[in-house]
Image: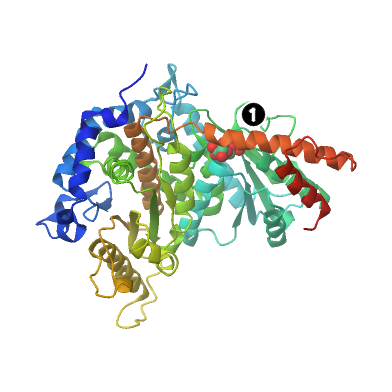
Amino acid sequence: MSCQKFFEIPACKKLLSHAGVINSPEKHLKNLIKEENRLEKFSLNRAGVFYDFSRQRVDEKAMELLFELAEDRKLNEMFNDMVIGKKINVTENRAALHTATRSFSDDPVCVDGRDVMPETRKVRDDIKQFASQIHSGKIRGTTGKKFKYIVVIGIGGSYLGAEFVSCALSDLADKDIKINFLANVDIHNFGRIVSLIDPETTLWIVISKTYTTAETMANTKLAYAFMEGKGLLPSKHFVTVTSKGSPGDDPLNPVAGSFHMFDYIGGRYSVTSAVGGVPLSIYLGYERFESFLKGAEKMDIHAVKAVARENIPLTAALISVWNTSFLGYQAQAVIPYASPLSRLAPHIQQLNMESNGKSITKEGDFLDEPAGTIIFGEPGTNAQHSFFQLAHQGKAFPIDFIGVINPFYKEYQEKSKGVTNHQELWSNMLAQAMALAVGKDDDNNAKYFSGNRPSSTFLLEDLSPENIGRLLSFYEAKTVFEAFIWDINPFDQFGVELGKTNASGIRSNIAAKNENSDYAFDKTDPITRFYLDTLFAGRL
Ligand code: F6P
């Protein structure tokens, strides 16, 4: 069934025409922010976070039309369908139940009439027990030593979320256990990691939903060979997190622990499942992992229950679509003023761009224009000294500023220019958002700032596990709401397949050459052949 084209929806037609109004000089942000009660009207303080969109290029009419679009797209209803287990991943005929992994409610969540909560709870219990046995030393390596290093092998959704959270909460981590992530197949990563670990006290956690991903398989093979080369037993040093029945879920290949992930959890939405649970519970302690889940659950409940106008991720998604589809911004930056959130942007890149970088509707029709937004980011103030020149005077892009009210380290109160470091950080965050919005006139064109550059500000009280959970869930829900607005499926990723297929053809050619040095790459295209010849020649 073919749905109405996006720009033909009545609310979209009105939004398109209203974008013309917003582009007029009177609606410059420097004027909008002077409106009475601007902050009160264009901000939400809910679910333990503060979301300020007063410096977005919206007025009351724009918001009214965006909420009309939300109603037309039945956003609350669609989100609820997802949470109760309807198969909204239509191309793969699957449910999308990442929210179940952090549900502590007694309510059942059914897929095909089967309650998935018992298996979800069991995975959590198993993780809790396993982490405690690692910490107590009940589970040890080949030589009887306690584990001191974890190396997580996995890529994409089987890596980025866990890395983001481990980095965000590393100040709370058990200082006796170090964590490393081996994602890329690049041998530099493997080489560097093995130079940092002590193999006897290393636990490798292989995370792969399919257990076929080329990078993860190559790194796992290398890690097995490395450990065996040191006389250490893989069965005592490897743990798997994979789907039931995958090639990695093999009783003939015993491991120190094995945990399941389920087909209703997409990779990039999996950090609250065993994918994040196993490494994070060992690195941070299970209790902290559980607090993180509870924070995510609070934001999930808000996303399901709050009406559109009070719903933070829904509102943020509407604004994001407004910026992309109606005001024409191609990119969006995520700038946390908190260094522990340095791996947030890479995680959101996969979460949002793999979910929403699509060209067809969920019914299979081509969209009026491709969906999605280019996401990038770095922590402030570093970002200011890197790409903010472009943000202020080059091509404009909306920004999510993320502020943390209370830093983890409160004891260092030395003041420079009358302020503490944390206050200096905040001065910068506040100054940037305002400078981008207001701009500055100057007779000298080189010093002229056009302003009218939109941003949101998102505040967390601190970097507790709960708040990291809220932040994660906020971005997941925002991503999903955006997809619902564009009428796309945020849970498949066919766009990553073509490159993988091509790599497999090239790999076969390289393997043939490895077997037979006379093998010539004459069946490949001339451009690829040049590079392969160069690789084998070892020089330019
Ligand atoms: O990049 C494509 C992708 O399929 C992601 O969606 C997924 O998170 C990642 O590869 C890893 O997949 P797996 O967990 O199966 O190794």
Q: Residue at x 64, y 28 (%)?
A: 246
- The N terminus, quarter of image: top left
Please give the residue where the numbered disc 1 appears in the rendered image. 246
Q: Is residue 127 above or below residue 262?
A: below
Q: Dividing the image into 4 quarters, which one contains the C terminus?
A: bottom right
Q: Name the residue located 70 percent from the left edge and 30 percent from the top edge.
A: 250
Spot occupied by residue 218 in the image (x, y as percentages of width and height): 72, 43
Q: Residues within 10 Å of mark 1 (few under 14, many from 20)?
A: some
Q: Is residue 429 above or below residue 63?
A: below
- State whether label 1 is within 8 Å of ligand 1: no
* Nearer to us in this view, 67 or 314: 67
- Tell me: 280 left or right of 232: left
Q: For residue 211, which quarter of the picture? A: top right
Quarter occupied by residue 448: bottom left
Determine the residue positioned at 61% across, 44% down.
154
Q: Position of residue 350 (x, y in %)?
A: 49, 44
Q: Position of residue 310 (x, y in %)?
A: 21, 42
Q: Is residue 329 above or below residue 2?
A: below
- Residue sitting at x 17%, y 54%: 27
How many labels sit on residues? 1
**What colour scheme does the image use?**
rainbow
Under mark 1, the amino acid is: Ser
Label 1 secondary element: loop
Image x and y of residue 86, in percent: 39, 22
Q: Residue furthest bottom?
A: 417
Residue placed most toward the observer, 15 or 226: 15
Task: Point out the quarter of the image occupied by ligand 1.
Answer: top right
Q: Quadrant of residue 420?
A: bottom left
